[in-house]
Image (cartoon, rainbow, N blue to C red):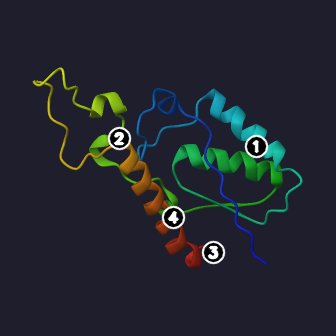
Amino acid sequence: MTRIGFVRHGITDWNLDKRVQGHTDIPLNEKGKLQAKALAGRLTNEDWDLIYSSDLSRAKETAGTIAEAKGVPVKLDHRLREMDCGAVEGTTAAERVTPRSQPSYPPRPAGIVSATIARSTLLKNHERKVMQAAPTLS
């Protein structure tokens, strides 16, 4: 039986700042590197044959750390990247919301939605991308 596990990359400085990352290639920070090492240690007794990873450095480094500890290869696939968030990438929620008390504040760019809708859409899109890529990963 094939078993598939999902691992999120370690933390980045943009995670700490609550900035949208998307396709922007933000590397792991020191804490993220420690998280990857800790997870690799936790997975020592699990039997893995292969690791697939996004080609973005934060995911690639997390996967590489785990793969090295387990002695398995990593295959990179750009289809496993986070959703491309366009103009929203690099911004915080505060930078995307027009305060009611400041009517002269620049309007939100077209297509930017609430964080709740964005999260829901992101999860649905990522699940769809993984399911589309799964049969062709080899």
Q: CA distance from mark 2 to mark 1?
A: 27 Å
The spot of residue 17 in percent (x, y) is: 46, 27
Q: Earlier in the sequence, mark 3 or mark 4?
A: 4
Residue at image mark 1: 39
Labels 2 and 3 touching (C-beta < 8 A): no
Quadrant in the picture for the N terminus? bottom right
Circle 4 sits in a helix, a strand or a loop, which is it? helix
What number is the disc on residue 20? none
Side of 25 where 11 appears, left or right: right
The residue mark sitting in front, 4 or 1, is 4
Residue at image mark 3: 138
Residue at image mark 4: 127
Q: Is residue 126 above or below residue 105?
A: below
Residue at image mark 2: 89
The residue mark sitting in front, 3 or 4, is 4
Q: Nearer the viewer, residue 109 or 81?
A: 109
Q: Residues within 10 Å of mark 2 (few under 14, many from 20)?
A: some
Q: CA distance from mark 3 to mark 1?
A: 24 Å
The residue mark sitting in front, 4 or 2, is 4
Instruction: Work out which residue is located at the far right of the displayed protein and give it.
Output: 45
The spot of residue 112 in percent (x, y) is: 26, 45
In which quarter of the view is residue 106 placed? top left
Q: Is residue 62 above or below residue 16?
A: below
Q: Earlier in the sequence, mark 2 or mark 3?
A: 2
Q: CA distance from mark 4 to mark 1?
A: 23 Å
Q: Earlier in the sequence, mark 4 or mark 1?
A: 1
Q: Is residue 68 above or below residue 19?
A: below
Instruction: Name the residue type under label 3.
Output: Ser
Q: CA distance from mark 4 to mark 2?
A: 20 Å
The residue mark sitting in front, 3 or 1, is 1
Quadrant in the picture for the C terminus? bottom right
The spot of residue 108 in percent (x, y) is: 19, 38
